[in-house]
Image (cartoon, rainbow, N blue to C red):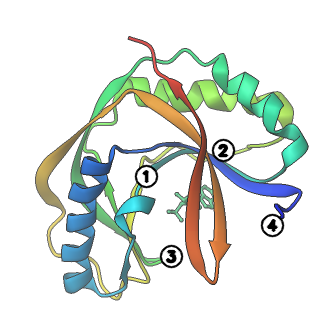
């Protein structure tokens, strides 16, 4: 029997449909050839909205009811550029234009969680979709043909490691408005 620990490593994310994960995964493997490092497997590709960290499972239902009250609008994300962060050697995909509804969703989640002590991110939100870890060098070209991603829901996700492999489990999803 699988015994779950008392705490869970949690984050809110936009979770792409499998065909969008495949498009981004193909880009990740192309970048892996160019930059070295390790491509994130298709099934793990996502956009983090708010990172919560390790949270007691007894707080899950409270977090879920706060998330259910979020009323941000759905939006279209045009994933059209890649960037490299030297400090953690991540190559990631992002969007030249961050849709206002995405900022609004992140802000609403942050406000909903403010009283819970779960999340205290003070830096400006930079939407990033991690494609490569341990990259050896930055990609030469920052732009690529846009991958359109209609985002119509958001998810609460648990992150676990089994034998050093990242496993993400979508615990619940909520629709965006519109
Ligand atoms: P990363 O891809 O840049 O590592 C699950 O770990 C998700 O939460 C990943 O998208 C990861 O971003 C993000 N994450 C992990 N630790 C974080 C932190 N301290 N602050 C913000 N996001 C974090």
Q: Secondary structure at mark 4?
A: loop
Kindly indicate whether the residue at mark 4 contacts the one at mark 1 (C-beta within 8 angstroms). no
**Residue, disc 4:** 1
Residue visible at 24% across and 49% down in the picture: 19
| Marker disc for residue 46 | 1
How far apart are labels 3 and 4 at the CA level?
A: 36 Å
Residue 115's x, y, as percent?
A: 84, 29
Identity of the residue furthest to the top in this view = 178
| Marker disc for residue 65 | none
Specify whether residue 112 is in view: no
The answer to whether residue 48 is above or below residue 42 is above
How far apart are labels 4 and 2 at the CA level?
A: 40 Å
Residue 101's x, y, as percent?
A: 41, 23
**Residue, disc 2:** 122
Specify whether residue 36 is in view: yes
| Marker disc for residue 88 | 3
Indicate left or right for 113 with 85 as reference.
right
Indicate left or right for 154 with 8 as reference.
left
Mark 4 or mark 2: which comes first in sequence?
4
How far apart are labels 1 and 2 at the CA level?
A: 21 Å
């Amino acid at each position: 029997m699988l015994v779950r620990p008392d705490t869970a490593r949690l984050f809110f994310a936009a979770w792409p449909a499998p065909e969008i994960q495949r498009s981004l995964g193909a880009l990740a493997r192309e970048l892996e050839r160019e930059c070295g490092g390790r491509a994130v497997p298709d099934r793990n590709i996502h956009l983090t909205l708010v990172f919560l960290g390790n949270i007691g499972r007894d707080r899950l239902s409270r977090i879920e009811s706060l998330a259910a009250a979020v009323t941000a609008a759905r939006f279209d994300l045009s994933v059209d550029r890649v960037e490299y962060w030297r400090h953690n050697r991540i190559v990631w995909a992002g969007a030249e234009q961050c849709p206002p509804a995405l900022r609004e969703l992140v802000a609403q989640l942050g406000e909903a969680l403010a009283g819970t002590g779960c999340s205290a991110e003070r830096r400006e939100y930079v939407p990033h979709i991690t494609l490569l870890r341990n990259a050896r060098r930055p990609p030469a070209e920052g732009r690529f043909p846009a991958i359109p991603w209609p985002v119509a829901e958001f998810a609460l996700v648990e992150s676990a490691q089994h034998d050093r492999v990242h496993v993400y489990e979508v615990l619940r999803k909520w629709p965006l408005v519109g």
